[in-house]
Amino acid sequence: MKNKFILFALVAMASLLTMCSEDEKINPAASITLDPASDSGKPGEVVSVNVGFDAPNGAQDLYVYVNGVEEDFISVSGVSSPYTYEYTVPTDATIGSTIALAFQLIDAKGYPSQVANFLITVGETLSGTLTTRTLDAAQQYFIKGQVFIPNGVTVTIPAGTILKGDKATKATLIVQPGGKLVCNGEANNPVVFTSAQPVGARDRGDWGGIVMLGNAWVNQSAQPAIEGITPTQKFGSTTAEGATPTTNANENSGTLRYVRIEYAGIELTPNNETNSLTLGGVGNGTTMEYVQVSYGGDDGFEWFGGTVNGKYLVSLSTWDDDFDTDFGFQGNIQFGLVVRNPFFGDQSGSNAFECDNAPNANDTPSGASGYTRPVFSNITVLGPRDFTTGLGSGTSARSISANYQNAIHIRRRVAISIFNSFFSGFPVGVRLDDQATLDNLNNGTSRHAFNVLASPNNTVLGTSTSSSNVAFATGLSGGDATTLQAYWTNNNNTLVNPSAGAPWSPTPGTPANSVDPYPGLGLNQNMFWGGSTSSTYPSNPNFTVTAGTLSSGADFTDPKLPGSFFTSTTYRGAFGATDWTDGWAEFQPLSKIY
């Protein structure tokens, strides 16, 4: 059938000239709204959309186009009468493809409305409360609204399955305590949760992400509710229920293996958000390996209590924090990668590590045994600032979002331990807020050892609680970070930073006496985001480290690093000679066709 868009424009122009000559009143053209804006349907299934319109001159004709070709013509009347349009998905439609329906209304004076688009993902909709089932990798799934996996229910997702979250309904997949989500991706065939928006239009916050809840320890006085979900979803076990830090520690909430979570996490109201992956009270019977979160609308990974362990985790270009620990989380994490986009930072202040315990620095139920006390090893943080030329050099550093704060922020009596890791590129390297948190370091409740901090600033110590562009800052009396620096030095941690006389530069000797710090560390400069965009950062960067400072110096003798979980390495940071992101991770999802 003939496309009538151009004809409509000509008719409208002719009508306008006639009316002007006759000095008629000119009303606005019609407008169209669609509810919903997108949906999904299996081949042969009928999909409905409510077409609302406002036509001051009266409605006349509604045209429907499918993928740019005229499909239907409907006579309508009235000024604002809604119309329900039904479309049958072709029986030969390709699973995972998108069908674009375009609606345009011509009013009684011949004026065309703007075109309104309705997108149909060919596949099955997941909504409401699910029952035990295994999905089919041969078709795609459309997550719509809040979708629950309740107690006693297991949903299994095989390798290669694609699931898309609906933007209009803030789609979120929620595993309630006692439920199980089993994602069995493979190294060359991961499970992908992504945005339902078209290629090139995906953005952070397109959907709500995955919320996984369990019954393991949380160090709150009463059972908490997870953020961002209505109705209230409580999780974890507390002293109010007679729990201890070992209660339900081995509980199994499922498996996340070779999984990507893209464009997920929504800030609903201030301090009320979903993250790319939220874990509340999840036990260590749960498997979490090879999980990538990308372009999240809030935190990448956030743990609220629980004991779940994890290996091979990637946080790419997230909005707020990458690894956020709260409420007594006590798991082990090894091999983690953070790549920060210099231009994406949350107004609340973005950190690679944000480490909390309870709402303040007071003691928590069960004392030190109940503190937030996870153990991290072999983490690589590639911060937002790659090179800086150092103070006094006369040249400018590459600009970054003013919302960036700390590579590591520890506070509120937290007892996190970090070993054999590399941190770089944040305005502040390590910020410690309170004496109780420093006491945990000094008495061995927590430990930071054999780490490398590459601070892009030539000032080492902060002198106030608001210090920035320093390696170390504290909220202790007077803001003097000398004690924190001494702790790091005395525990085999290394600080690498420029000086006024030897600034950092990608071109050694320009400016005078400048050096490129990355070859000495063993890093490939292309690993950093730098001046890239969402479309130009490499799809598959090479993260291997085979020489330099990071290729050696790791130590696994501390009793906090049990060999039953931690793999002993010689290198510091997440990578040695093998790039474990190859094959399953994706660093340019904006243009990925699913």
Image: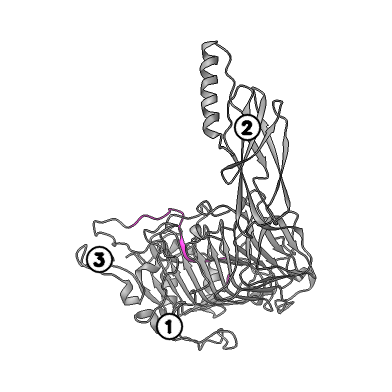
Helix, strand or loop for disc 3:
loop
| Residue wearing tag 1 | 571
Q: Position of residue 324 (x, y in %)?
A: 57, 65
Helix, strand or loop for disc 2:
strand
Residue at the image point whose x is 57% and y is 18% from the top: 26
| Residue wearing tag 3 | 507
Residue type for callout 2: Leu
Cα–Cα span, label 3 and label 1: 27 Å
Q: Which quarter of the picture shows residue 61? A: top right
Query: Which corner quadrant holds the C terminus?
Result: bottom right
Colour scheme of the rendered structure = one colour
Indicate which disc residue 105 carries: 2
Q: Position of residue 13 (x, y in %)?
A: 51, 23
Residue at the image point whose x is 50% and y is 74% from the top: 583
Contact (Cβ within 8 Å) of mark 3 with mark 2: no
User: Image check: 502 left or right of 46?
Assistant: left
Q: Position of residue 307 (x, y in %)?
A: 66, 75
Nearer to me, 41 or 72: 72
The stretch in magenta equals: 398-414
Indicate which disc residue 325 carries: none
| Residue 227 in sight in this render | no
Q: Residue furthest front?
A: 1
